[in-house]
Image (tube, rainbow, N blue to C red):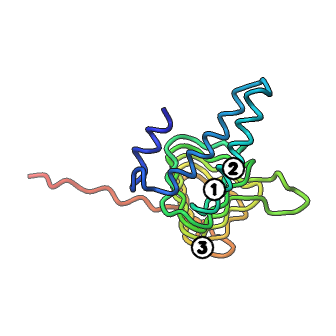
Amino acid sequence: MSFFEDLRVAREGVLSLGFWALQVYRFGHLRYRFRTPLIRYPLGALHLVLAKLAEMFCGVTIGVSAKIGRRLIIEHSGAIVVHGNAEIGDDCIIRQGVTIGNRYLHDPFGAPVIGNRVNIGAGAKILGRVRIGDDAEIGANAVVIKDVPAGAVAVGVPARILEKKTPPARESAAP
């Protein structure tokens, strides 16, 4: 069912390159459901070919062992890299030029954990073992190297954390 959910949120529908790159990831991740090498290895080989095609034609590289939630939107494809140990929650948006990956060579598996409904701006880099809380916003070209609390905004290089301001409550006009 994730195919149809992903298709429903893809703004360009079946023409969205980000949608197809995500489907290649989901196909590759499917192989983990099978224990027998007779099924798992051929699926892995096919995924390797499809992943390289997605990298070349869509400009999106997603590590097959990453954990990606439902309804991820890859708004504009191109120069997007998602580390194989990264975790991305439900209803997130990723734009072009985003890197979600490790920070240090001596910690190759240190990847970010991103909550639900996170909006990641174009060119943003989220690096290392950081946690991004639910409903956070990562500004365009921000370089995030420390945790971002839920509902906060991260901007700049290195990213500064700004608390998201809630709009003032509207007062109702009483007669």
Q: Residue furthest right?
A: 106
Label for residue 33?
none
Circle 2/circle 1 CB separation < 8 Å: yes
Going from N to C along the chain, the mark reached first, 1 or 3, is: 1
> Is residue 63 shown left or right of residue 120?
right
Q: Name the residue under label 3.
A: 141
Instruction: State the residue in front, 4 or 134.
Output: 4
For mark 1, give the secondary structure. helix
For mark 2, give the secondary structure. helix
As shown in the figure, which amino acid type bears the numbered disc 3?
Answer: Asn
Q: Which residue is drawn at 58% across and 62% down?
A: 57
Q: Quadrant of residue 77?
A: bottom right
Q: Which residue lies furthest to the bottom in this view?
A: 157
Q: Where is residue 106 in the image (x, y as percent from the top left)?
A: 91, 59
Q: Mark 2 points at which residue?
A: 49
Instruction: State the residue in front, 16 or 158.
Output: 16
Going from N to C along the chain, the mark reached first, 2 or 3, is: 2
As shown in the figure, which amino acid type bears the numbered disc 1?
Answer: Leu
